[in-house]
Amino acid sequence: MMAAAPRSNVYSENMNKRLSVTVPILDVQSGNKFPEPMCVKSHGTITFPDNKSHQAKFIRILKTASVTHVKEYLIGEWSGERPSLVISITGGAKEYNMKPRLLRAFRRGLLKVARTTGAWIITGGMNRGIMKLVGEIIQTNPDRSRPIHLIGIATWG
């Protein structure tokens, strides 16, 4: 789950860094992979202020970055394998109360699907509303040997 980190840790240290990352892209015609540069504005690790032992990787890319390049980068750098399923969970940032029975069913179902399929879960990357709930659920994953990949896509700044 993406959360706001102190600007001194992430923003100021990485604000003007531009890295040329080479992403292997598959040429559909020939089946061969060839390197394709992708402009990464910054990347690194976020340490969350409320839990110093919990960290998450982040990447800041140009708005014009190719979806294919981003996908290949995530596979190559972060997980090593393609997900068998991608789950996009959207909802408002407004706080709300879910009935306990519905919350238990949602928690149990999300964890089961994510663990059994190796799914990537994508949210809006904020620590509010349904996005916060999803982050809290993923943190309860009892099998740390098989992490669940949670990707928050948020605006910068």
Image (cartoon, rainbow, N blue to C red):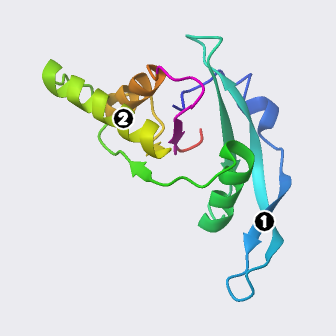
Q: Position of residue 99 (x, y in %)?
A: 13, 22
Q: Main secondary structure of the magenta part?
A: loop
Residue 89 drawn in magenta = no
Residue type pointed to by label 1: Pro
Q: CA distance from mark 2 to mark 1?
A: 32 Å
From the viewer's perspective, tell me whether residue 122 is left or right of residue 38.
left
The residue positioned 74% from the left and 23% from the top of the image is: 9
Spot occupied by residue 109 in the image (x, y as percentages of width and height)? 29, 35
Q: Amino acid at mark 2?
A: Lys
Corner quadrant of residue 13: top right
Query: Height in image: 149 above or below 28?
Result: above
Q: Secondary structure at mark 2?
A: helix
What residue lies at 66% left-to-right and 38% top-to-bottom?
Answer: 58
Classify residue 86 as left or right of residue 26: left
Circle 1 sits in a helix, a strand or a loop, which is it? strand
Question: Which residue lies at the image location 61% right of the left edge and 18% below the top edge?
Answer: 48
- Which residue was labeled with disc 2? 112
Residue 35 image offset from top left, x and y in percent? 84, 69
Residue segment shown in magenta: 142-154
Q: Check residue 144 for magenta coloring.
A: yes
Disc 1 crowd rating (10 Å Cα; few below 14, some 14-19, many 20+) is some
Residue 72 place in picture, x, y as percent: 68, 60
- Answer with left or right where residue 150 lies relative to residue 5: left
Which residue is situated farthest in the bottom direction here? Answer: 29
**Who is closer to the viewer here, 113 or 73?**
113
Mark toward the start of the polypeptide (2 vs 1): 1
**Numbered tag placed on residue 24 in the rendering:** 1
